[in-house]
Image (cartoon, rainbow, N blue to C red):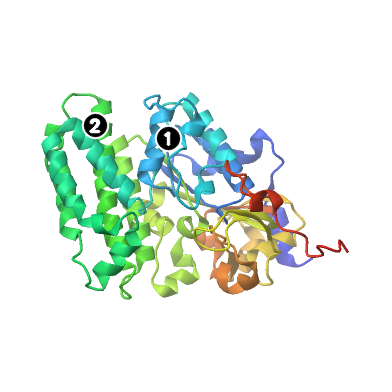
Amino acid sequence: MATIQRAIIDTATQLAGAPSDFDEIIDKIGDRRFVLLGEASHGTHEFYRLRAELSKRLVREKGFTAIAVEGDWPDCYRVNRYIRGRGKDHDATEALGDFKRFPQWMWRNADVLDFVGWLRDYSGVGFYGLDVYSLHASMQAVLAYLERKDPEAARKARARYACFDRFGEEPQLYGRAAALGISEDCQYEVLSQLMDLQKHRRELVQRDGILAEDEQFEAEQNARVVAKAEEYYRSMYLGHVNTWNLRDTHMMDTLDALATHLGKQSKIIVWAHNSHVGDAAATQRDMRGEINIGHLCRKRHRAETFLLGFSTYEGTVTAANDWDEPAERKRVRPALRGSYELLFHETGLSKFLLMLDELGEAAGGLHEPRLQRAIGVIYRPETERQSHYYEVTLPDQFDAIIHLDHTRALEPLERTPLWVRGEFPETYPTGL
């Protein structure tokens, strides 16, 4: 066994499924305000389960007050209302009902269902979405709020948002037409609506109390999402605009807005992919000028930020072959040569936590750039090197990493026939 593998074994904390597994990481987090928890895929059961268990301890022992996820604001806010006992949903399954668009399984799955049920018992903890995709759902939420608060303002908002009507429910059609000059863009209208909401905040909050403030904040955030989504979909067809940076900057700005709204004592846990959570400055993405939430959070709140990544060597994953295609239970190939995942596999440890600022003799070898696998909602094993690996320097990317040598697919609430069947073994149909 090479020196670096022995050094990792000496430094790592093996995970045994015991309550004490996270003691070291809880101590290291200390009084930090932002804890960002990654995942190496959007479809791995163990990543969701361990994030939930760690989040529970952070809520109970460190006073964390909110979970912010890589999900859409209006869909997540329905869950937030359920958790706080303010919604109309009777159970967690109903509360997850607005997660309808691809990839539905990312939040409508058994692990999130259990976690939302637990959060209901801790009704002081909020659940919020950071993402930018919900153009139409956020517009509808703004209109519904104004119909209750100010019907005349709702009429003006509806007239502004009618700018999108000719494109139906497909924001990509709007983005293409606006970017190519086929149609006027809606930038002025969406920004005007956001400014109107902000200008008339006091008038719209008609009674004192946190509930009225929460409703106004929810509406303003939906208006921000509309404005940023308009820019995002329009920018998709402008080659000089980095839409990755636009999206992650929006998610970080939402995190900051949420922290401000919840108050100085608030502490927030973020659930997102490693590619968003790990500091982009330590990855191949930096060479392309890309930033992400982890990088921005360190830049804006260095002393208050903790970044945790996850990795796996092999197993199964819930993913699709392409965008908008059905969820499948796909086999994850063993990690490639030259990757951190293979290096961790070669230690012989099945599950471990590695604090990356306490590496000892492992420091030198781990600071050498290596490949890291990233599976999103799409997994293409036939082009795995090109599609799912990029180069990183792990100790600069995260503060800690949890490696699970073998993992299994996340269980969707809606199982497709492809998911139930899973992938046939390579020897099918002979069985040899």
Return the x and y of residue 116 as percentages of the image width and height.
50, 33
Determine the residue positioned at 62% across, 44% down: 411
Q: To which residue does mark 1 refer?
A: 79
Above or below, comparing residue 200 to residue 85 in the picture: below
Q: Is residue 182 left or right of residue 420?
A: left
Above or below, comparing residue 387 to residue 270 in the picture: below
Determine the residue positioned at 72% across, 41% down: 16
Q: Helix, strand, or loop for circle 1?
A: helix
Above or below, comparing residue 363 to residue 106 in the picture: below
Q: From where the camera sits, is residue 389 visible?
A: no
Determine the residue positioned at 53% across, 29% down: 118
Q: Nearer the viewer, mark 1 or mark 2?
A: 1
> Which is more N-terminal, label 2 or label 1?
1
How far separated are the C-alphas under marks 1 and 2? Answer: 18 Å
Residue kind at label 2, given as amino acid type: Glu
Placement of the C terminus among the 4 image quadrants: bottom right
Residue kind at label 1, given as amino acid type: Val
Q: To which residue does mark 2 refer?
A: 213
